[in-house]
Image: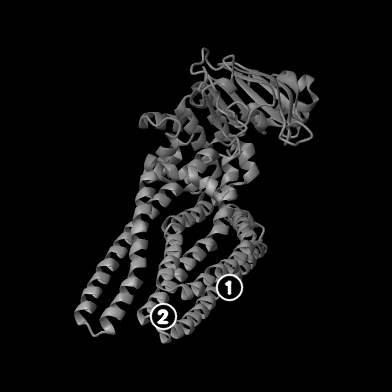
Amino acid sequence: MLFRLLAPRLRPYRSLLVLLVALQLVQTLASLALPTLNAGVIDHGVLRGDTGRVLSGGAVMIAVTLLQAAAAAAATYAGAKAAMGVARDLRSEVFRRVQDFSARERGRFGAASLITRTTNDVQQIQTFTVLVLTMLVAAPLLCAGGLVMALRQDVPLALVLLLFVPVMTGAVGTVVLRMRPLFRGMQERVDRASRVLREQITGVRVVRAFVRDRHERERFAAANGELLTVGLRAGRLQALMFPTVLIVWQLTTVALVYVGAHRIDSGALQPGGLVAFLGYLLQTSMSVMMVLFLLMHMPRAEAGAERVREVLDTRPSVTPPTHPVRALPGTGRLDLDGVGFRYPGAEESVLHDIGLVARPGETTAVIGATGSGKSTLLGLVPRLFDATDGEVRVDGVDVRTVDPELMARTVGLVPQKPYLFSGTVATNLRYGRPDATDEELWHALEVAQAAGFVRELDAGLDAPVSQGGANFSGGQRQRLAIARVLVARPRVYLFDDSFSALDPRTDARLRTALREETADATVVIVAQRVSTIRQADRIVVLDHGRTVGTGTHTSLMRDNPTYREIVLSQLTEEEAA
């Protein structure tokens, strides 16, 4: 999974990889030459007292060392650059895929998990890629080259060295296989800890209001404790690796010195040859350590790759049309014809055979009990998810065939929970129309009844907005979100319970100003408060996902018991009349 994920994303960096291989080849050859050069200095210079040979040999060794260092530094730079590029591309790819997800896919993964997969999991893959590019080529070359050079020096001693590699491989491989499921579990527990932390930060007011600080600390401690437990188990296995390598290396060194001493005593080997053998043992050990270090990171990178691949392989349920419609002929007429919606695997549909017509210049309201499907119905128009039955049409064109950019310009949605981005008031208002002038921004704020509190801010339109608009009240966020849609000037306005945080006076003034501003547009309002929608040209009553009434406030009060029950739960008979 890991290498299948990396292979196609390394192709754009082929030139860097070719340079990397060439540099690592130079580095490895220089490393392999040093023990032999050192043996020559000892045998032909030190033992014979030839100072000139020692100096000339030492100069050559210094030159080879400098070449090795330069090649190693350049190879590390090339490998790191390629790995960082792959991680950047992978993060962008995951981000683009998440942007294409509908509410269904985002709900399946969860925000905390998607954030972890885009950051932490990609970081694990990046770290592993750096190690692969800087070690995977050099380590096998160094190991194989060391064994070949050792065989050239002395075959019996080389056999001792040959035993080192399979023993080490078997020991390390056993540990790595046991680590893989542990690292997968670690990533899942990172998800859970992130989710709990995100909930606590987002819901801190609720936590404090109910004095549940201790409970939330215990929840986080439990999630953190599970992560600690799995991390300790993986850490214990990791801790076995280096002592194992060290023990085998020391035993091999003792065996080499013992056998080598007898070979020197018999005249079959020169002292410099034994020194060279110890150098090749060190190099072989280093190559095994490099592979070991690589294998230590591989299980966690594989777990991250599986989770990233899971996101990339998920096909969005809302897909752009193959041959999109790039122009709409009308002025914003909205038709829902026999619309139904069912979540995957659900036994019951959320919406059943909904029929609705909303015309330009009119206000259409949707009302119903909690859970009746009002927000789901509104979400079908801008394609937050697609209807499973029937058609949603704008200007007579099925929304599933409309170009997404055109759809965004045609339909403006103010969601039930308005969200502001970090930046300034102006950048938030220009989110749907970057070329809007300051005069247009102030006009939208006036209509949305937000100009007053924005003028009171020290910087006005340039006043800072924190993440999520946390430095504004709920009512202020709603009004800024309404102003943001007004700046975009769409043909169809969708208000999903967007007035719930407003006091009755501000609500009335805002609806009056909106009626004038959107006189030629199609307006659909979802609301819980009857006072918000009683003046609508058409009111659609939903009950358990079905249309149970359509008409004006007066006709529905007279003929529709469901609507009448909703109204009388909020108003008296006199107020309702």
Against 75, is 344 above or below?
above
Where does label 2 land, which residue? 268
Q: Image quarter for residue 487?
A: top left
Front residue of 355 and 307: 307
Residue 413 point in image, percent of width and height: 55, 30
Is residue 544 positioned above or below 116 on the image? above
Quick one: label 1, few (<14), some, or many (20+) residues within 10 Å? few
Q: Is the residue 234 above or below the residue 194 in the image?
A: below
Residue 208 appears in the figure: no
Q: Which coloring applies here? A: one colour
Residue at the spot 43% in from the left edge and 42% down from the top edge? 11
Q: Viewed as shown, does residue 215 lie left or right of 254?
A: right
Query: Of 431 and 401, which appears nearest the observer?
Result: 401
In the visual, does 110 lie left or right of 121? right
Residue 559 at what x, y percent from top left? 79, 19
Q: Residue furthest top?
A: 329
Query: Tag 2's secondary structure?
Result: loop
Spatial separation of the CA atoms under disc 1 and disc 2: 38 Å
Which residue lies under the disc numbered 1? 240
Of mark 1 and mark 2, the one earlier in the sequence is 1
Which class describes the residues within 10 Å of circle 2: few (<14), some (14-19), or many (20+)?
few
The part of the image, by quadrant, that contains residue 527 is top right
